[in-house]
Image (tube, rainbow, N blue to C red):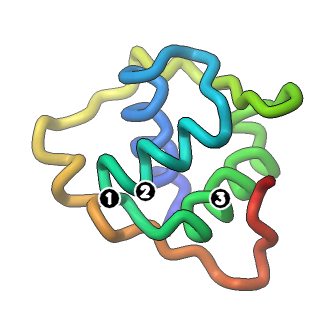
């Protein structure tokens, strides 16, 4: 998974849920509702986003650090990215 894919998945999340989202809500939406990947891979993706300063964390909430409402997202992108979140096991999941 490259940075563009992470950015697009996060843009979808923040557009639907607002600029501040709880970690549990993010995992539940991205994994179970929208089926981007398994919960552990979603948590690893969030760790990567946090490490690359795409998001910031305040307690149990994450906040967008990019202009998610300006990112171009095609209507079929969610379907294209479904099941594509694959992050290596060397990244610790966010808790």
Q: Position of residue 95 (x, y in %)?
A: 80, 53
Q: Position of residue 8 (x, y in %)?
A: 41, 42
Picture mark count: 3
Q: Nearer the viewer, residue 40 or 68?
A: 40
Q: Which residue is drawn at the image coordinates 37% and 34% (left, top)?
A: 12
Marks 2 and 1: in contact by CB < 8 Å? yes
The image quadrant of residue 31 is bottom left
Marks 3 and 1: in contact by CB < 8 Å? no
Label whose residue precedes the other's in the sequence (1 or 3): 1
Q: Nearer the viewer, residue 94 or 71?
A: 94
How far apart are the alpha carbons under marks 1 and 3?
13 Å
Q: Which residue is drawn at the image coordinates 45% and 21% (left, top)?
A: 17
Callout 3 secondary element: helix
Q: Position of residue 19 (x, y in %)?
A: 57, 16
Which residue position holds label 1? Answer: 35
Callout 1 secondary element: loop
- Residue 43, numbered circle: 3
Q: Is residue 47 left or right of residue 37?
A: right
Which residue position holds label 2? Answer: 31
Label whose residue precedes the other's in the sequence (3 or 2): 2
Q: With respect to residue 67, does 50 lie above or below?
A: below
Q: Which residue is drawn at the image coordinates 32% and 47% (left, top)?
A: 33
**How busy is the neighbourhood of tag 2: few (under 14 within 10 Å), some, or many (20 plus)?**
many
Marks 2 and 3: in contact by CB < 8 Å? no
């Amino acid at each position: 998974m490259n940075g563009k894919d992470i950015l697009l998945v996060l843009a979808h999340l923040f557009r639907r849920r607002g600029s501040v989202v709880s970690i549990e809500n993010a995992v539940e939406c991205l994994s179970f509702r929208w089926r981007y990947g398994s919960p552990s891979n979603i948590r690893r993706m969030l760790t990567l986003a946090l490490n690359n300063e795409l998001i910031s964390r305040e307690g149990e909430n994450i906040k967008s650090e990019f202009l998610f409402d300006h990112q171009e997202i095609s209507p079929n992108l969610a379907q294209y990215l479904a099941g594509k979140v694959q992050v290596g096991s060397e990244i610790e999941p966010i808790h």
